[in-house]
Amino acid sequence: MKCFRSQTTKVHSIRPLFLSRRRKGLEEDEEEFLDQVPGMPTRFSHEELTVMTENFSKKLGEGGFGSVFEGIMSDGTAIAVKHLQGFGNVKKSFLAEVATIGSIQHVNLVRLVGFCAEKSQRLLVYEYMANVSLDRWIFHGKQEQSLTWDVRKKIISDVAKGLAYLHEDCNNKIIHLDIKPQNILLDHNFNAKVSDFGLSKLVGKDESKIFTTMRGTPGYLAPEWLHEAITEKVDVYSFGVVILEIICGRKNLDRHQDEDDMHLLSLFKRKAEEKQLWEMVDKNSIDMQLHREEAVEMMKIAAWCLQSDYTKRPSMSLVVKVLQGLVDAETDLDYSFQYPPITRRIAEAKQEREAVVGISLPFPSELSGPR
């Protein structure tokens, strides 16, 4: 018995050392990866960010991977610092975010100012967005906080331009994979910028489809996820859901509604068949009611983006042209929208929880240079 106890003690004394060495090895790999990424943003120490955020005292919000805090740089520039928490997928999300948007710039993509990778600390430093995320403005139900039709239309256009850039203008196509109101940030003038690239996927220009694990948020996942192979059209589908949420002023799954109206896409189909889409326009906004005809036309663009057959969805650059009035939108549309049954079950059970399954990292050589 004494011998057995002695061996057990020895094994337990080795385990922390093994884990420590393993974690150190992962951190060294991460350091090597970050050093190879072109156009890297500023690297901050944890001490510097602690000072800038006044010891992380002003929380702006929190999400699936951590909390976001307000801060001020030494030159007076306002920043938002996301403090990632956890290990494994969080580290992958951190690397994907730094590698993806650390080297690209576009007016409708949130700018990554810098990052911190110090021991177990993982923080991302973004430009400060005074009006926080879109969900705060469209899921409120209060007239005094309601966005006007012109602002909503501008936000939709801004997001479309940001996605068109990711899909078509980078050296490699970037599929965001998690487009939703929470990941659309608004500056002091309500200019919209796509954020949170922790789940994004880089794709070669010559690749039409990719195979990857299902990732994203229930309610925004395109039906082709069930067939594994996906294209950038999964972002187009998510964008279509977001358009509807913006126009209707409600979530795609709203348990406060009657059972028949709980699922926004089901309601959309029914109202389209009844030729009463105008009834879906945000009733909490007087301005939106004054622009119901225009709002209904926008909902038809959403329907185009939501086609179950991804080949019938428009590219984001085509959506931009339609929004600019340069070309007409498709009118021969199928309103029998589909989305993965698993998504529906998860969404009903965990309405606000992200279903993050896997995250892949790009090679530094695959990244787009600054633009």
Image (cartoon, grey):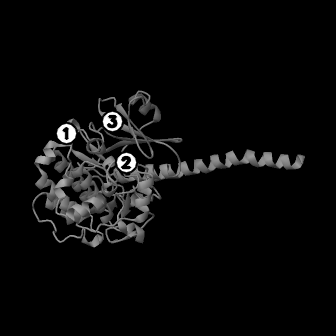
In the rendered image, residue 97, in percent from the top left (x then y), is placed at 39, 50
Q: How many marks?
A: 3
Dot 2 or dot 1, earlier in sequence: 2
Disc 3 to disc 2, C-alpha distance: 17 Å
Q: Amino acid at mark 3?
A: Ile
Per the image, label 2 sits on a secondary structure element best described as loop
Q: Amino acid at mark 2?
A: Met
Q: Amino acid at mark 1?
A: Asn
Q: Residues within 10 Å of mark 3 (few under 14, many from 20)?
A: many
Q: Residues within 10 Å of mark 1 (few under 14, many from 20)?
A: few
Q: Which mark is residue 40?
A: 2
In this rendering, the label closer to the viewer, 2 or 1 = 1
Per the image, label 3 sits on a secondary structure element best described as strand
At 36% from the left and 55% from the top, the residue drawn is: 178
In this rendering, the label closer to the viewer, 3 or 2 = 3
In the rendered image, residue 108, in percent from the top left (x then y), is placed at 24, 49
Q: Residues within 10 Å of mark 2 (few under 14, many from 20)?
A: many
Disc 2 to disc 1, C-alpha distance: 28 Å
Above-or-below relation of 348 to 51? below
Q: Which mark is residue 79?
A: 3
Above-or-below relation of 276 to 44? below
In the rendered image, residue 310, in percent from the top left (x then y), is placed at 29, 70
At 33% from the left and 36% from the top, the residue drawn is: 79
Please name the residue that numbered disc 1 is placed on. 189
Disc 1 to disc 3, C-alpha distance: 17 Å
At 42% from the left and 55% from the top, the residue drawn is: 348
Proximity of marks 2 and 1: CB atoms separated by less than 8 Å: no
Dot 3 or dot 2, earlier in sequence: 2
